[in-house]
Structure formats: structure tokens, C-alpha cells
């Protein structure tokens, strides 16, 4: 009995010693010194600062010297330290494989998976440490990235986009839309797009998305530009139908965003309780004020308001071009309304039905055009702290619960170190006034000298 008691006591002491050892094990530290900090919010930099990283979080930001003798020292050489960029509207499963929605029916999973992996790395090495995919992917790639199997940004995903028959997400061919025995729809089979009619089907599609790991939901509330079956002015769902998805999302402590362009569809979605809008460029000033007053996040794709878009092969088709022309006309006063009411706009590139190479030039032009319309500071805030706020709407569903898009204590250590001052010149982040005529480029930018995500270096060309 005594021997047994001694063995139990010894085991308890050993367990306690192991616990103390783990508790005392210091997390790795990195100290950036001699940097000017854009914190994701302010319109000026914090000059001559130091930033201490501990583990995967920012521990301290100070204009005084930071005592961290065990830290890896990085002399920033007077460069700008800033948050990693956030693109709040991507489709990395629908870029680089098929160039029309009809082409999805011939797509293969191994193609889509391989290209999505390439797209993810492309985003990371262009300086994006977080993306929000608004239709087309589950959680599988995100999990591989988080496990360190492949490289890429943090990913928030909506799973399959949900829309009605003949809506923006109905990518089936005519035979698949038959009332007879329906051949398999690749959009549904690949969990990229669900056709759901009525409240019960919407609820089921919503829950199926959560079963596939979605962080939030996306509904097609109205017609789109790039699709063929739905007039741009069409209404896809009633308020009650959208409210069913909002309720399903609330049960998972997250939110619904909607694809909507027109004033009517946007207001119906807001009446249903959605918290985020994609596009919305054809709204009135009254609706812009409502969006601002209610704190709705707005993924505004400003490049979509440039007439150059008529040069895109998909938008030049006879079934699509008139919709784009009507959309461009309907958005002509939008910039004035946004400047007046200052809603929460996030950076939205929305590359889809394009090659990976065009995706790069599209991102570069979107940066330039946003800054051209609203100013460099507005672009940087949209692409950092406001995008980080939107990420927090996923509540308990959030795969990354700490702050994103800011340089402050407690936030994730997702950091860029860039030459120059992006508040004065966004070209240091790759912004380019050329779009369709842009010279093809390789991945990444020489002016982005350091890319850190989750406290880990993915690029460092300072030496």
C-alpha cells in the first residue's frame, strides 16, 4: 500500500513538473525595430516605432525601445510595417479552370483543387494574409493551409452560393433544368452552388453549407451581370426566404451576406436581417445612408464601375453586355453618395471566370482604382481593419478569433514590411492603373520585403 501511495505521489509530482515546464517554455519572439507603422486605422504612420511579436500574436507596439533580448531582431530600415491585406470577396475555386459558368459542368475536382491551391499561394505572396471566399468552397483547403501542408492566406468561406432556379447561381445547362430525371449538376456536386427554391430548401442548403465547414452564408438576392438566365433587375428571393437563411445562420452564431445590385433587392435583404452586401452599386443615396446608419459591411467592387469591363470576353457576350451597360449607368453617382455617408466598405476584387494571370492584374487595378476614387487611406482601411471587423461577424464560427487587419497588441501577427509609404503611394503594394492591357507579371512584388502570417515568415528579402 505504501509503495502504491509513493508511486501515485511520484506520478503527481512528475505531472506537475511537466506542467510547470510547459508553462515556463517561452514562445518565440520577433522584434521589428526602426519601422514606421500603419496600424490599419490611422491616417498617419506611427513614426520610428518597434513591434514585438510573441508566438503568433503582436505583443507590443511602442515608440520606445522594447527590451526583448531573446527575440529575433529585424531592422526595418525605416520602411512601413502594416497589416497584411484582406480581400473580402474572392472565388479562388472559380478562377483559372473555366472561363464561363457553363464550363463548370466539365470541370474536374483535381483541376479545381490544384488551381485553388495555386490561387491561395498567389494571394499570400501578393501580400494578402486573409481572404473571404463568397461562394464555391468548403473548409478543406483552409484546413490544409492552417495545418501547414500548403501555403496560403487565412480563409473565411461561405461554402456554396445559394440561389433560386433561374437565379445568378443557376449554372446548369438546359438539359439539367428539365422537370424529368435531372442529370447531375456539377455546381451542386462540387458544393460550389446550390439551387434552392422556397424556405425549406434554403434552410437545408444553409445547413448543408455549415456541414461542409462554411464560416458564413451567401444568398443570391437578385440578378447578376455575368450570368445569362437572370435579368439584372430580377428579384431572386422574398424577404421571408432570406430571413430563413438569416435564422439558420444565427443558429450557428454567424451571418448572411447577399449578392445584390439594385436598390430594391438591397433593401429587401436589409429588411431580412443580412449584415453584409456584395456589389450593390445601383443603390440610391437614401439606401447608402441606410447602409451606413445600420453598420452594414459593403464589399464594393469598384473596378466593376470602370467601362474597361466591357472588354472582358464574358461581359461582351450579347446576353450579358446590355446588363453591364445598365449597371454602369445605374452606378454613376455612387462614389459621391459613399463619400458623403461613409459606410463600412471592404476591399472586394471578385475575380471569377478568368485566368490566374488576369487575377493578378485585376487585383492590382482594383487597388489603384479604389485609391483613385476614395483616396489611399480609404483603400488601406478597407483592405485591412474594416475587413478584419467583417471577419469578426462570424462569432463562435470564427476560425480565427483574434483581431485581424490591425497592428496592435493582441492582434494576429499578420504583417507586411514595404518600401516607401502606402499612405502616399499605393503602387508599393502593387497598385497599377493598367488592367486589361497590363504587362503580365510574376507572383509577388519586390517592394513588399517581408510577409509574415500567424507569426511565421513567408518572405524576407531584407538581407
Image (cartoon, grey):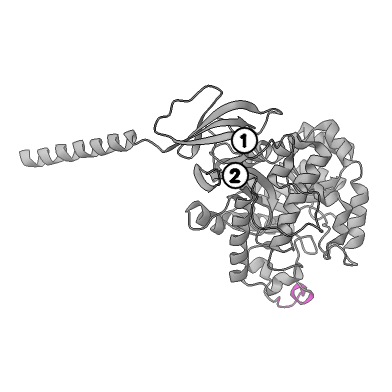
Disc number placed over residue 449 in the picture, else none: 2
Name the residue nearer the viewer: 290 or 19.
19
In the figure, 270 relative to 362: above or below? above
Q: How many marks?
A: 2
Q: Position of residue 192 (x, y in %)?
A: 66, 62
Name the residue nearer the viewer: 443 or 302.
443
In the figure, 332 relative to 408: above or below? below
In this rendering, position of residue 248 left or right of residue 400: right
Q: Check residue 22 for magenta coloring.
A: no
In this rendering, position of residue 157 left or right of residue 50: right
Name the residue nearer the viewer: 207 or 112.
112
Q: Check residue 181 for magenta coloring.
A: yes
In the figure, 119 relative to 410: above or below? below
Quick check: can you spot residue 297?
Answer: no
Q: Position of residue 220 (x, y in %)?
A: 76, 55
Q: Earlier in the sequence, mark 2 or mark 1?
A: 1
Among all residues in the image, which is located at the extreme top?
A: 64
In this rendering, position of residue 378 left or right of residue 63: right
**Residue on which disc 1 sits:** 79
Amino acid at each position: 500500500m505504501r509503495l502504491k501511495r509513493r508511486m501515485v505521489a511520484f506520478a503527481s509530482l512528475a505531472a506537475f513538473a511537466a506542467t510547470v515546464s510547459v508553462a515556463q517554455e517561452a514562445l518565440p519572439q520577433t522584434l521589428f525595430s526602426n519601422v514606421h507603422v500603419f496600424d490599419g486605422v490611422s491616417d498617419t504612420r506611427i513614426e520610428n516605432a518597434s513591434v514585438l511579436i510573441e508566438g503568433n500574436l503582436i505583443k507590443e507596439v511602442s515608440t520606445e525601445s522594447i527590451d526583448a533580448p531573446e527575440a529575433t531582431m529585424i531592422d526595418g530600415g525605416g520602411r512601413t510595417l502594416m497589416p497584411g491585406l484582406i480581400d473580402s470577396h474572392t472565388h479562388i475555386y472559380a478562377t483559372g479552370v473555366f472561363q464561363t459558368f457553363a464550363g463548370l459542368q466539365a470541370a474536374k475536382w483535381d483541376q479545381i483543387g490544384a488551381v485553388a491551391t495555386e490561387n491561395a499561394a498567389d494571394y499570400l505572396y501578393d501580400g494578402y494574409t486573409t481572404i473571404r471566399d463568397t461562394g464555391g468552397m468548403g473548409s478543406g483547403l483552409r484546413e490544409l493551409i492552417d495545418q501547414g501542408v500548403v501555403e496560403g492566406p487565412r480563409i473565411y468561406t461561405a461554402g456554396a452560393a445559394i440561389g433560386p432556379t433561374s437565379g445568378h447561381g443557376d449554372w446548369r445547362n438546359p438539359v439539367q433544368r428539365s422537370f424529368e430525371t435531372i442529370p447531375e449538376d456539377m455546381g451542386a456536386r462540387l458544393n460550389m452552388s446550390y439551387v434552392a427554391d422556397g424556405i425549406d430548401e434554403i434552410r437545408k442548403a444553409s445547413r448543408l453549407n455549415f456541414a461542409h465547414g462554411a464560416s458564413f452564408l451567401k444568398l443570391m438576392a437578385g440578378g447578376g451581370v455575368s450570368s445569362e438566365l437572370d435579368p439584372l433587375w430580377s428579384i431572386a428571393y422574398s424577404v421571408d426566404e432570406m430571413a430563413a437563411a438569416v435564422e439558420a445562420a444565427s443558429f450557428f452564431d454567424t451571418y448572411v451576406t447577399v449578392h445584390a445590385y439594385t436598390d430594391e433587392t438591397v433593401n429587401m435583404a436589409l429588411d431580412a436581417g443580412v449584415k453584409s452586401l456584395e456589389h450593390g452599386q445601383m443603390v440610391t443615396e437614401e439606401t447608402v445612408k441606410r447602409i451606413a446608419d445600420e453598420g452594414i459591411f459593403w464589399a464594393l467592387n469598384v473596378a466593376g464601375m470602370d467601362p474597361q469591363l466591357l472588354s472582358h470576353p464574358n461581359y461582351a457576350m450579347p446576353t450579358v453586355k446590355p446588363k453591364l451597360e445598365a449597371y454602369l449607368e445605374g452606378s454613376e453617382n455612387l462614389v459621391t453618395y459613399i463619400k458623403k455617408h461613409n459606410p463600412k466598405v471592404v476591399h472586394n476584387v471578385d475575380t471569377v471566370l478568368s485566368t490566374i494571370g488576369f487575377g493578378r492584374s485585376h487585383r492590382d487595378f482594383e487597388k489603384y482604382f479604389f485609391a483613385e476614387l476614395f483616396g489611399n487611406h480609404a483603400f488601406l482601411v478597407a483592405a485591412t481593419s474594416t475587413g478584419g471587423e467583417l471577419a469578426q461577424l462570424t462569432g463562435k464560427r470564427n476560425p480565427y478569433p483574434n483581431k485581424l487587419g490591425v497592428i496592435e497588441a493582441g492582434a494576429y501577427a499578420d504583417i507586411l514590411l514595404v518600401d516607401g509609404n502606402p499612405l502616399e503611394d499605393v503602387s508599393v503594394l502593387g497598385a497599377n492603373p493598367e488592367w486589361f492591357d497590363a504587362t503580365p507579371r510574376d507572383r509577388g512584388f519586390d517592394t513588399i520585403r517581408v510577409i509574415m502570417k500567424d507569426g511565421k515568415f513567408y518572405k524576407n528579402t531584407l538581407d
